[in-house]
Amino acid sequence: MAKIVLCRIDSRLIHGQVVTKWVGQSQANRIAVVSDELDADPFMKSIYLMAAPPNVKVDCYSNQSFAAAWNENQLGEGNVLVLFPNLASVQKAVIDGFNVTGIQVGGLGGGPNRKAVFQNITLDEADVIVLRDLQQRGVNVIFQTIPEDKPQALEDVLKKF
């Protein structure tokens, strides 16, 4: 069975920081992108799949198919970095049976009614509700944009909200 070496929430999914820093730091040889929008868009999916290093296998899943694939051991072998575009997506996967003990919030962009809480990470009221729900489900949540940053605990970040 594949081993999750990092579960990260980052609205940009596969991008420079993920490819140059997090893949190496986590020693991932696979990336699982979980996004309904990306899975439904073959053109954009192909662009994201090409963004990964050549030695890293990338799979893209819808929210619905990911938890089932994980539970049925369809992810195979290797060290997997799981990427979600937002907190609601990871919450849905957890509710659907994705058993993850910790998540890293690494990049949630700005927008209306969003407040910066740590570097480029912004939250809104709905995100806070999801974070509390994940915490109640036993998921440890940290905030960290790059490996060189000190991980920030959920409670410390929520004090800034």
Image (spheres, rainbow, N blue to C red):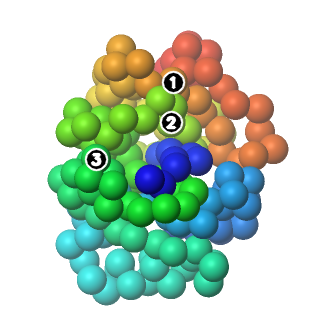
Mark 3 near mark 1, Cβ–Cβ under 8 Å?
no
x, y percent for residue 137:
34, 19
Looking at the image, tell me whether mark 2 or mark 3 is earlier in sequence order.
3
Looking at the image, tell me whether mark 2 or mark 1 is earlier in sequence order.
2
What residue is pinned by disc 1? 140
| Residue 18 can be seen, yes or no | no
What residue is pinned by disc 3? 71
Give the image quarter of residue 125.
top left
Mark 2 near mark 1, Cβ–Cβ under 8 Å?
yes
Taking the spot 38% from the left edge, 46% from the top edge, the residue there is 86
What residue is pinned by disc 2? 103
SS of the residue at dot 1?
strand
Mark 2 near mark 3, Cβ–Cβ under 8 Å?
no
Q: Disc 2 marks which amino acid?
A: Ile
Distance of label 2 from label 3 (alpha carbons): 18 Å
Residue 33 is left or right of residue 54, and the answer is left
x, y percent for residue 55:
63, 79
Distance of label 3 from label 1 (alpha carbons): 20 Å
